[in-house]
Image (cartoon, coloured by chain):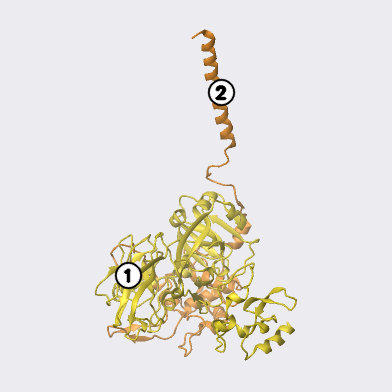
Chain colours: A orange, B yellow
Amino acid sequence: MNNRALINRYVITLLFFVISAVVIVVTSLKRTKASYPEKFGIGRAASAAEISALDIDVRPDGKGLPVGSGDIAAGKLIYNTKCLACHGDGKKTEVKLPGEPLFVDYAEFKNNTAGQKADQSPKTIGTYWPYATTIFDYVRRAMPYNAPGSLSNQEVYHLTAYLLYRNHIISSGTVITEKSLPKIVMPAKEKYVEDDREGGTALK
Amino acid sequence: MKEENSENKLFTDRKISRRLLLGGAATAAVVLVQTSVGKMVQAAVPESVVPPLLTDSTSLTAADLIADPTRIPGRGPSVSGMPSSFENPQRIPSLTSSRTPLQDLYGTITPSALHFERHHGGIPVIDPQKYELVIHGMVDKPLVFSLADLKRFPSVTRTCFIECSGNFRSGKEEMSPQEICGLTSQSEWTGVMLSTLFREVGVREKASWFLAEGGDAAVMTRSIPVSKGWDDAMIAYAQNGEAVRPEQGYPARLLLPGWEGNTSVKWLRRIELSDQPYMTREETSKYTETVKGGKIRQFSFVMDARSIITFPSFPVQLERGYVEIRGIAWTGRGKIVKVEISVDAGRSWAPAELQGPVLDKAHTAFRYLWKWEGRETEIMSRAVDETGYVQPSYQELSAARESKGGYHFNPITKWRVERSGKVLLGA
């Protein structure tokens, strides 16, 4: 093999590598499939004002409660005007109420399968609700059914006080505030347990 | 309209003829007819002559409507189809919910129009152009997403059931699967993974719960552990290939596969990250159940395994001979691995065939061939899921809970087959 042939072979090999490199670079530049990023940059920043306009929730620790106070007598007036028609006045009714009773002035017992007397009274705030803050949160967001969201914070505070009173949780004359409401210990709280089902053979 | 009304009178008390069909009238069905100038047009069949299935009229039968479909061209294409007018499966609505007619369905997908409903303040009308989802609280960057934004993110499609945890009724013999447990339905859902949105807003490490809030009149709220959000939660904007139906949360809803339906908050407008649950009304006074020892069980999210024979079931009149027992089984804890059938009132059990592919947290169809000789018996199914959980009998469940019903009650459904072929709900 002469020198010329050797140089030719060398040049051809070099050319091959150069072309390969160009092809690789061009292919990678033309690649259209993007890899998934951590963030897409979609959506706009939420302003503090728009968040607070929507953020109506109240937590058991009182976060979200507006400054204010509620009075039992004022609550009674509002209840009788806006709630009683559906939720009743704690008396036993012949016809089922459109809304469930929130407090009852009677106890209802029936014989259970073991022949013992079992309390069949309706589940009420006093017998079933574990947190008092839930009353404020729920009444403000969803009641009355025909005009949800129409009550002022003041009205909701008054109603909360009245409902707690009718369930024998606060005594007459008690005024509730954003400070005192989260501290109220509800009778049903101690009955609450977390779900412990996890499949498998144990039936819970 | 005036003409249609006057035409309508002509049809009353008369059987339909082609001539009668020439006049267009209100409504229900449409056929092709030839006009006097020989042009084929579509004409509405007046209400008074549609099949009795739709009108309860007994004077006309389907055969009267079109005696020989090979002798008259059928109707042409349309912008949107409807089920055959001979088929009329219906939900059973109450004031706050409606139930899927399980006994009238085939396979595992619930037609969107028949998906069960449960809402707490009615179905809101939400303009998709104005729709916004806000995610805030314990995040690095609170963000607002429009519907178009949600659709720009990588999309995911999955098939799963949604079941209301209050899905157990009993108390009389004449009850259909729909009445017993029609608050479960299955769809193919499409949307964006909530984990994608969690990364976008930068959910903080200390966030352990999030509040999901709907934009309906109940402004429905539930607290959800953040782990579910990172796991398989979705924001769904499509159902069975089309936009989510209004009663299912249009334009976008939360979807928590395998969890009690109430947590899949519809018309989702806000998610707030928190380090504790909010103890909303829907997770305290509702969607909690009394269990052993007078306790109240809370945050019972996962739906346990359940099954029901949908054929034969009330109100079927069974005939002797081969009967393919059919039904659905499902579990919120993964896949159904086995469904067993008893045709001798629970004395012996044999495995049913499962229709594949068996999907995670999804209705799974099963079938079992049986030859009924006319003897009185009870037939029933029990589901087994991948955790080894076996669907309990009513008596077992009732004893374990010290309860007769309530949320998360998933007992075996027994069907009593009488000698006459009558099928009734067993005790």
Measured as percent of width and height from the top left, residue A64 is found at: 54, 63
Quadrant of the image containing the C terminus of chain B: bottom left
Subunit of label 1: B
Q: Check disc 2 and report the residue beneath it.
A: A18
Q: Compared with residue B61, is residue B108 higher up or lower down, i.e. above or below? A: above
Q: Is residue B260 left or right of residue A82?
A: left
Measured as percent of width and height from the top left, residue B85 is found at: 56, 77
The amino acid type, in three-letter code, at marker 1 is Arg
Q: Residue at x 52, y 44 (%)?
A: A36
Nearer the observer, disc 2 or disc 1? 2
Measured as percent of width and height from the top left, residue B340 is found at: 31, 68
Q: Is residue B6 left or right of residue A54?
A: right
Q: Check disc 1 and report the residue beneath it.
A: B382
Asked whether the viewer can see residue A175, the reply is yes
Measured as percent of width and height from the top left, residue B352 is found at: 32, 67
- Quarter of the image for residue B125 reads bottom right
Categorize mark 2 by other alpha carbons within 10 Å: few (<14), some (14-19), many (20+).
few
Q: Residue at x 55, y 55 (%)?
A: B136
